[in-house]
Image (cartoon, helix red, strand yellow):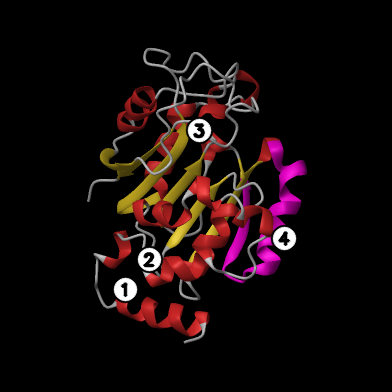
Amino acid sequence: MKPYLLAAAVAAVLLSGAPALAQDASTPAYQAAVADALRPADEVERDALRHPAEMLAIAQVKPGQRIADIRPGAGYFTRLFARVVGEGGHVYAFVPNRTAERENPRADALVAAYPNVSRVNGDLDAMSFDQPLDLVFMSQEYHDFHIPRFDVDVAKMNADIFKALKPGGLYVVIDHQAAPGAANSVVETLHRIEGAQLRKEVEAAGFVFDGESTAVANTADDHSLNVFDEAIRGKTDQFVYRFRKPN
């Protein structure tokens, strides 16, 4: 069966109500998204470290959903989401005003390649979307928003994400783990944040912790190096937390 037909068939099954498929990394729709021929070779090369199918599974991505990918960069996850949500869904590539001049062209390239993707600009602590969302996704970005030069009210950001989601909607965050007790004290020097600190901040906005993945964890990382240090770059110990907006 051709990939696009396979994805369509799986989409129909998922929409008919087979929840187990939406949480299984081997779901054919996830595998079809990972195999998308439009994905750049340099992104595909990173799959062994980034575990894209497992990330789709922890985020419980389904056809027809509306997803905001916060600061999507070159679009590693945006491309995957676009394929899984399909024609009936939509992906918002949210680019902060502060970095828009540099990052808008990359988001616009995603819009040109995927008809169900649109670019949204705004302030991180004043985010809004034209439709209620099923998922807000943030990969390796949350720690940056504690850095003073970003000028973000992180508590307000989390509150706005809470408002943007449907009841039962999910907020999934991937970030670089800091050492125990570091909290958010090394966000600028090491580009890491302690998972316990992030969880406390997100739960303060009203979210309920709903699960985690260890797919991108690395126990060999002692959390002492800057994440851009070549000795650890791409192989940091990362946490993946899923939060749910109560119904």
- First to last magenta residue range: 99-121
Which residue is depicted at the point 61% across and 43% down? 122
Q: Residue at x 41, y 64 (%)?
A: 65
Residue placed under numbered mark 1 in the picture = 14
Q: What kind of element bears circle 2?
A: loop
Percent position of residue 193, x then y: 46, 23
Neighbour tally class for label 3: few under 14, some 14-19, many 20 plus, Cα within 10 Å: many
Amino acid carrying mark 4 in the image = Ala
Q: Nearer the viewer, residue 76 or 247?
A: 76
- Residue 1 x, y percent position in the rendering: 47, 87
Q: Is residue 75 left or right of residue 21?
A: right
Q: Look at the image and tell me whether residue 8 can be seen.
A: yes
- For label 2, the residue is 62
Marks 2 and 1: in contact by CB < 8 Å?
yes
Magenta stretch contains residue 171: no
Return the residue at label 4. 109
Q: Residue at point 51% right, 45% down? A: 49
SS class of the residue under badge 4? helix
Nearer-N-terminus badge (2/3)? 2
Kindly identify which numbered label has been placed on residue 122.
none
Which mark, by number, is residue 142? 3
Q: If you read the primary sequence from the N terminus, does the residue marked by circle 2 or circle 4 appear first?
A: 2
Report the side of 64 relative to 83 (left or right): left
Mark 2–mark 4 CB contact (< 8 Å): no
Report helix, strand or loop for mark 3.
Answer: helix
State whether residue 90 is above or below residue 226.
Answer: below
Of the image marks 1 and 2, the number of the one nearer the N terminus: 1
